[in-house]
Image (tube, grey):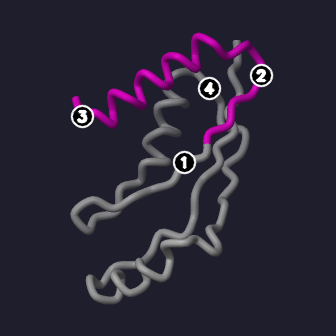
Amino acid sequence: MQVKNLIILILTAELVIISKPNKFCAILMGDTRRNKMYQPLAFMVMQRFLNAGFVLKEDIIKQQHNCKATGFWVNKSKEANFLLIMHEHLFVFQKVD
């Protein structure tokens, strides 16, 4: 099992234990690239929470503005021919009985 999957699994298990029934939990997650390929980490995390028994109440998409590293990555993206990831997901889950 990859380290990132193990971390997500542990995080999900801990939140299932400490979350109270009918209360909410929110997670801000971004995606990434590995070897020039898009890695949808946010949706991987969302699926783990759904499998653990949480219900997705909202998926709020947060657009990124004025990041300090954007200028650096704009040039890199043109050189390496890839698009910038300019958003994050704020997942709002509810733990149901």
Type of amino acid under label 2: Lys
Type of amino acid under label 1: Met
Measuring 60% from the left and 53% from the top, which residue is drawn there?
89
Type of amino acid under label 3: Gln
Q: Earlier in the sequence, mark 2 or mark 3?
A: 3
Q: CA distance from mark 4 to mark 3?
A: 23 Å
Q: CA distance from mark 1 to mark 2?
A: 20 Å
Residue located beneath label 2 in the image: 23
What segment is highlighted magenta in the picture?
1-27
Q: CA distance from mark 2 to mark 3?
A: 30 Å
Work out which residue is located at the far front of the displayed protein and give it.
68
Secondary structure category for the residue under label 2:
loop
Q: Which mark is residue 29?
A: 1
Percent x, y of residue 61: 66, 59
What crowding class fits label 2: few (fewer than 14 Cα within 10 Å), some (14-19), or many (20 or more)? few
Type of amino acid under label 4: Phe
Q: Earlier in the sequence, mark 4 or mark 3?
A: 3
Of labels 1 and 2, the one closer to you: 1
Secondary structure category for the residue under label 3:
loop
Percent x, y of residue 50: 54, 30
What crowding class fits label 3: few (fewer than 14 Cα within 10 Å), some (14-19), or many (20 or more)? few
Residue located beneath label 3 in the image: 2
Q: Is residue 25 left or right of residue 44?
A: right
Of labels 1 and 4, the one closer to you: 1
Q: CA distance from mark 1 to mark 4?
A: 16 Å
Residue located beneath label 4 in the image: 54
